[in-house]
Amino acid sequence: MKRAGLLLLAVVPLALTAVACSEDTGKDRPAAARPYDEDGSSADRRTDDERLAGLPPGLAAPAKKELAMKLVASAENSTLDWRGQYGYIEDIGDGRGYTAGIIGFCTGTHDLLELVEDYTKARPDNGLARFLPALRAVDGSDSHAGLGRPFTRAWAREARQAAFRRAQDAVRDRLYFDPAVRLAKLDGLGTLGQFVYYDAMVMHGPGTGPKSFHGLRDAARRKANTPTDGGPEKTYLDTFLDVRRTLMRTEKSHRDTTRIDTAQRRFLREGNLDLRTPLTWRVYGERYRTGAP
């Protein structure tokens, strides 16, 4: 989700931009996401809840979650200032319509529609509510019908409202962050592994197809055991990153894999499974550092 005006585009063409929407537009949108325990019972979920309650917060700890947001923003927006992205909106030409907000909600992949619907339930008089019929009509396509400049201006204006910023945070957490962290913990992964899952879910979407998060996880588990299944954590994460990297290289909007090669893989090689700070990494040739010296 790079900005068209960033200097970084002198290094990385726009075709390489990444967004928080699945490549399989439509069938892999967030509304079609597979629950982590789709084959389990409510008793299974209660058992998992009890198990998770005894685990450390990991990536959900406030400082680590802030770090996760910065890491994703460095790859999606070429900045560590993730809070500066609430009002962002543009069509980056990837077939998903408008990409907007802190993790790239898309008009073509349902999550932007879900965000505006949720926000409108809480604030019916908001400046985006009048676009709901158009958003429903273009869902699953790259069309701008009924949207255009009036919609993009309304989005930017609404992003000045604290309530809309909170709404973006809530949908991000419900569709992406919380499911990724939960499933990573159930797979026996530490803080780095939880981030690896979250970043993959942001980019590829939480759908069930082979180009989405659950498809990646299934492919990785066929090659290596998760820690819960008795496998070494580093081996499994290496396998997951290999699977994801292979997929990214086949997608025109994801072909630059530096968010894996010189960021996540670097942390893994260093044995930093807890994402201890300070962290130094590179994405698209740009160097980033965060955390106490």
Image: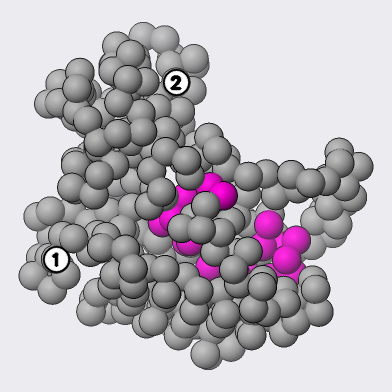
* Numbered disc total: 2
Q: Are marks 1 and 2 in contact (CB under 8 Å)?
A: no
Front one among 8 and 33: 33
Q: Would you place residue 102 above or below residue 118 in this image? A: below
Q: Would you place residue 259 above or below residue 254 in this image? A: below
In magenta, the rendered stretch is 183-208
Q: Would you place residue 70 above or below residue 166 in this image? A: below
Assess whether residue 179 is covered by the magenta stretch: no
In percent of width and height, residue 269 lies at 52, 90
In percent of width and height, residue 222 lies at 66, 73
At horizontal 25% and vertical 63% (from top left) the residue drawn is 252
Indicate the secondary structure of the residue bearing disc 1.
loop
| Residue bearing the label numbered 1 | 13
In percent of width and height, residue 268 lies at 54, 84
- Dot 2: within a 10 Å radius of its alpha carbon, few (fewer than 14), some, or many (20 or more) residues? some
Q: CA distance from mark 1 to mark 2?
A: 34 Å
Front one among 67 and 202: 202
At horizontal 79% and vertical 71% (from top left) the residue drawn is 228
Is residue 37 at least partly visible in the picture?
yes
Which amino acid type is marked by label 2? Glu
| Left or right of 71, for residue 18 | left
| Left or right of 134, for residue 187 | right
| Residue bearing the label numbered 2 | 117
Quadrant assignment for the N terminus: bottom left
